Image (cartoon, grey):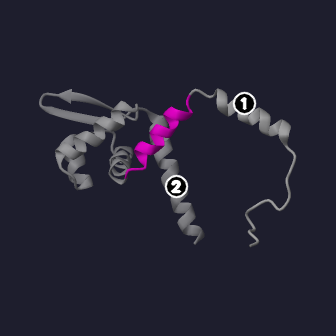
Amino acid sequence: MSERDVCEVICDSREKTAILKQQIDQSKNIVEVTKLFKALSDETRMKVAYALTLEKELCVCDVAEIVGASTATTSHHLRHLKSLGLAKYRKEGKLVYYSLDDDHVKQLIRIAFAHQEELVSRG
C-alpha cells in the first residue's frame, strides 16, 4: 500500500519540531480558537455569521427569516456567537440588533468563503 501523501523516509527535523511543539504548547489560545471554529462549523451559525458580513447589523427576526429558522432558534445561535466573542448586540426599544464583534471576525468568514470559491474554481 503505497501512499503518495506520506513520507517514505523518516526525516530528522528534531530541532525545528521541538521549537514548534514548544510554541504550540505554550499558546494559551488553542482551546479558545478551537471553540471559535467549532461554533462556525454549525451550518445555521455560519449562515447567521455570513449574513452579518453582508449587512452591518440585523435584528433577530430578520436573521431568523434569512436563515429559515424560528426566532427562538436564531436567538440561541446568536447568543452562542456572542458568548464566544464573535457577535455583539444592542437593544433598541423592543428590537435586538446583532452585528459581528469586529473586523477580524468579518475577515475570517470572508476569507473562508473566498477559499471555498477558489477550491471550487480549481475543479
Q: Is residue 48 left or right of residue 75?
A: right
Q: Give the amino acid at mark 1.
A: Gln
- What residue sits 82% from the left and 38% below the top? 16
Q: Of circles 2 and 1, which is in front?
A: 1
Residue nearest the observer in this picture, 11 or 98 = 11
Q: Residues within 10 Å of mark 2 (few under 14, many from 20)?
A: few
Q: Which residues are magenta?
A: 29-42
Q: Which residue is mark 1?
A: 22
Rendered location of residue 40, percent (x, y)? 42, 46
Q: Is residue 74 above or below residue 67?
A: above
Q: Give the amino acid at mark 2.
A: Ala
Magenta stretch: residue 76 in it?
no
- What residue sits 22% from the left and 46% below the top? 73
Rendered location of residue 96, percent (x, y)? 20, 33
Q: CA distance from mark 2 to mark 1?
A: 32 Å
- What residue sits 58% from the left and 26% below the top? 28
Rendered location of residue 22, percent (x, y)? 72, 30
Res 70 visible: yes
Res 59 visible: no
Q: Under tag 1, what secondary structure?
A: helix
Q: Is residue 9 left or right of residue 80?
A: right
- Magenta part mainly helix, strand or loop? helix
The quadrant the C terminus occupies is bottom right
Q: Which mark is residue 114?
A: 2
- What residue sits 34% from the left and 51% below the top? 47
